[in-house]
Amino acid sequence: MTPQSNIEKFPLSLRLLHWSMAILLFSMVAAGLVMIESLAVWQPTLLTLHKGFGALALLLVCIRLVIKIKANTPSLPSSIPTIQRFAATLSHYVLYGLMFALPLSGVLMQYFAAQPVVIFNIVTIPAALTPDINMFALFRVTHEYFALVLIGVVSVHLLAALHHHFIKKDEVLQSML
């Protein structure tokens, strides 16, 4: 990524990926929370969709990372203190890490449950031949904790964007709209 102070907005491709992934991740977390609380007849269908959209999220974050590395992007305003710049950079690294780690931990959870991951009936990621309950449990808990951390980091990200827009009245949020 090459921050440039004269650029006012993120490229359209990054803005579209940002907002579509925000909706996708919000939906995925909501579906995950509903699934762990329900044994309803529709739960297996939701799990199948959750797996497919999780794979889509992993693909989109790969595309997004490549575009972000190559694109010229707006710099943060010079009025932002160094510690806040560091926090913003760190939070973005954590967000990207979670966008990779969540789907991968979900795939590994299903692998060790001996359940293949069928992605929209197009691609199948194979499963272990026999279940390993200990590894399944490890990745299930890991997947859950990653989701909880994602909720926290996204909440801080959202609050920071709103703080910039409504309190600081700078162009940070506008650069992504």
Image (cartoon, grey):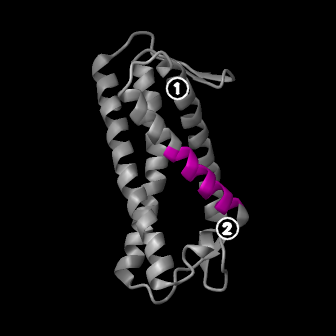
Q: Main secondary structure of the magenta part?
A: helix
Residue nearer the viewer, 160 or 109: 160
**Was residue 139 drawn as part of the magenta stretch in this picture?**
no
Q: Mark number for residue 151?
A: none
From the image, tell me which residue sits under label 1. Answer: 46
Seen in the picture, residue 61 relative to 110 is either above or below; the reply is below
Mark 2 falls on what kind of element?
A: loop
Along the horizontal axis of the image, is 87 left or right of 59? left
Which residue is at a point 44% across and 41% down the rendered structure image? 102
Q: Residue furthest top?
A: 130
The Cα–Cα distance between marks 2 and 1, rounded to whole angstroms, is 36 Å
Tell me the amino acid under the disc marked 1.
Answer: Leu
Which residue is at a point 50% across and 39% down the rendered structure image? 28
Q: Which residues are magenta?
A: 13-26
**Was residue 18 drawn as part of the magenta stretch in this picture?**
yes
Residue nearer the viewer, 112 or 173: 173
Q: Residue furthest left?
A: 134
Residue 32 image-quadrant placement: top left
Residue nearer the viewer, 153 or 111: 153
Tell me the amino acid under the disc marked 2.
Answer: Ala
**What is the x, y in percent for residue 53?**
58, 35
Which residue is at a point 48% across and 70% down the rendered structure image? 161
**What is the x, y in percent for residue 172?**
54, 77
From the image, tell me which residue sits under label 2. Answer: 71
Point out the frontmost of discs 2 and 1. 1
